[in-house]
Amino acid sequence: MAPGAVRVLRLGLRPFPQALRVQERCVAAARAARGSAAAESLVLSEPAGPVFAWGLRGEPGAAAAAALRARGAALVAARRGGHVTFHGPGQLVAFPVLDLRRRRLPLRRYVRALEELGLRLCQRLGLGAARALPPPFTGVWVGESKICAIAPLHRVPLQCVLMGGCFGPGRGALREPHHIARAGAELLH
């Protein structure tokens, strides 16, 4: 079966929790469609404000959470792997919802393909020093800074895997897009 087209939802500038709800509805639709190509989608958005999202590896501690909120950042739980990730204005956040089994695409190869896409985008933007690191690391790095994050967000029984990626070339690295992210990096690491 051919992979088929993927429906693209361009949300524009949106609060991160709102975009996350759209992504979760796409996952629910994929589950209900039982592997149909019609259920595959790509949700694109730009966070309207600073937010730290945490995955399965844990939320920030109470003191770090309070300090981030005091600096104006929201905190959101996301159903994905990984630790805490910053999302904010100037970043592209992409949530593909794909049936990797139907596409006959192993998860690791899919992650590497997303990294390659991030590297090609960096090259087009003049960031020739961008590189991907070997497993277990994911994403695209420039120097010591991660400029493109990739994290599995949700795995459903159909092997529909949702990956989130955020790309922030206009603001520099994901670690330091502005003062809130810098403060978060200091508090969380």
Image (cartoon, grey):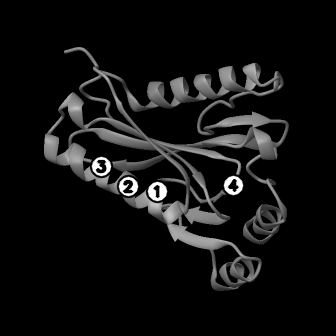
Q: Is residue 180 above or below residue 135?
A: below
Q: Between marks 1 and 3, how big is the CA–CA gap?
A: 13 Å
Residue 93 falls left or right of residue 1: right
Q: Are the residues flagged by discs 1 and 3 in contact, CB closer than 8 Å?
A: no
Residue at 26%, 28% (x, y): give it: 101
Instruction: Indicate the quadrant where residue 116 lies.
Output: top right
Question: Do the CB atoms of the residues marked 2 and 3 lie less than 8 Å apart?
Answer: no
Calculate the distance from the C-alpha at mark 2 to the C-alpha at mark 3: 9 Å
Q: Which residue is mark 3?
A: 27
Is 58 on the left or on the right of 157, as rendered? right
* First-in-chain label (3 vs 4): 3
Crowd band around label 4 with a 10 angstrom C-alpha radius: few (<14), some (14–19), many (20+): many
State the image coordinates of residue 168 (x, y, percent, origin top left).
71, 43
In space, the residues marked 4 and 1 are separated at their CA atoms by 13 Å
Residue assigned mark 4: 89
Which amino acid is tagged 2?
Val
Q: Position of residue 90 (x, y in %)?
A: 71, 48
Residue of label 1:
19
Looking at the rendered image, the disc whose residue lies closer to the viewer, 3 or 4, is 4
Q: Does residue 59 appear in this view? A: no
Tag 3 and tag 4, C-beta contact below 8 Å: no
Helix, strand or loop at label 4? It is loop
